[in-house]
């Protein structure tokens, strides 16, 4: 489908443009998703700052453009908020006394001269072999990933049964700005950083992704499915949106 400039809407002197999969207005670019089950328009601002709009299959291009135009102040406010939160995430230095999260709790780091393994968690402290500091980040990522694999596999097993979902594989890896991802092939992926979240928040990530087995978009029916299994999902979702960036600095 060719790019069609729509002159009735102009922002910053530039005409808005829309294709089958992309909408551009006011210097912003949105991924466009259409769903036959969707009744209303919805805009999503991801943690990464990526923007998307979900629309009913029959929604007119002009309707989407009008909706985005109406929500521009809200969108820019959200983008500024995301950028501000990102700036709050400190980069780890791997020095004595520095705090590292694990399942929502912060543990101080202690550098150890003699230790059989590179990293351990004992007596309420992360203990890192001093000779391994030069590759500390990789060591922490590996340690977190190993624990996350076990923790999320157990959580998925418990919740998937109750939610009527068949899972072929649970895998932990770096997902960029996503906490999790549900594939149509029955594979469920989680970011290794999700093991840094408090258990109740990590459980929300699990239920959220499992709900996508029933509803691939974030429609009203999707949130109804989430609420059936987590009645307080709104509080958990809000906590994640506000505080999730705290785990980004590793």
Image: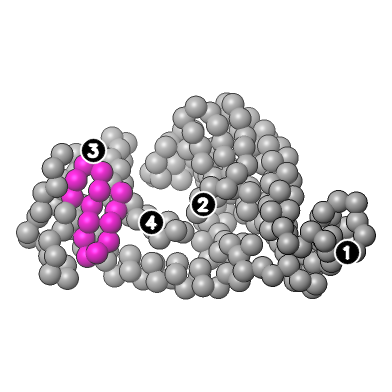
Q: Nearer the viewer, mark 1 or mark 3?
A: 1
Q: Secondary structure at mark 4?
A: loop
Where is mark 3, residue-wise? 57
Residue behind mark 4: 50
- Seen in the image, is 41 located left or right of residue 159? left
**Residue 154, placed above or below residue 78:** above
The local crowd at label 3, few if under 14, some if 14 to 19, many if 20 or more residues have their Cα within 10 Å, is few
Q: CA distance from mark 2 to mark 4?
A: 12 Å
**Along the polypeptide, which appears first: circle 1 or circle 3?**
3
Identify the image quadrant of residue 79.
Answer: bottom left
Q: Nearer the viewer, residue 187 or 60?
A: 187
Of circles 1 and 4, the one toward us is 1
Give me the disc on residue 112: 1
Q: CA distance from mark 2 to mark 1?
A: 31 Å
Give yes or no for residue 14 being in the magenta stretch: no
Residue 180 placed where, x, y %? 54, 45
> Which region of the structure is painted magenta?
18-31
Main secondary structure of the magenta stretch: strand
């Amino acid at each position: 489908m060719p790019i069609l400039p729509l002159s009735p809407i102009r922002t910053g002197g530039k005409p808005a443009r829309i294709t089958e999969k992309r909408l551009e207005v006011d210097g912003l670019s949105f991924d466009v998703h259409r769903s036959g089950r969707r009744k209303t328009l919805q805009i999503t601002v991801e943690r990464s700052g990526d923007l998307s709009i979900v629309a009913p299959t029959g929604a007119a291009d002009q309707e989407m453009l009008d909706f985005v135009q109406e929500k521009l102040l809200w969108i820019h406010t959200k983008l500024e908020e995301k950028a501000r939160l990102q700036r709050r995430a400190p980069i780890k230095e791997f020095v004595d006394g520095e705090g590292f999260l694990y399942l929502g709790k912060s543990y101080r780091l202690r550098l150890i001269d003699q230790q059989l393994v590179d990293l351990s968690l004992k007596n309420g402290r992360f203990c890192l072999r001093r000779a391994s500091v030069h590759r500390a980040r990789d060591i922490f990522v590996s340690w977190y990933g190993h624990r996350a694999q076990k923790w999320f596999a157990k959580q998925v097993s418990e919740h998937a049964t109750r939610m009527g979902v068949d899972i072929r594989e649970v895998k932990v890896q770096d997902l960029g700005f996503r906490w999790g991802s549900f594939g149509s092939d029955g594979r469920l992926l989680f970011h290794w950083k999700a093991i840094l979240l408090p258990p109740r928040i990590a459980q929300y990530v699990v239920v959220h992704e499992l709900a996508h087995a029933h509803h691939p978009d974030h429609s009203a029916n999707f949130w109804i499915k989430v609420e059936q299994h987590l009645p307080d999902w709104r509080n958990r979702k809000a906590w994640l949106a506000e505080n999730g960036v705290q785990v980004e600095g590793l």
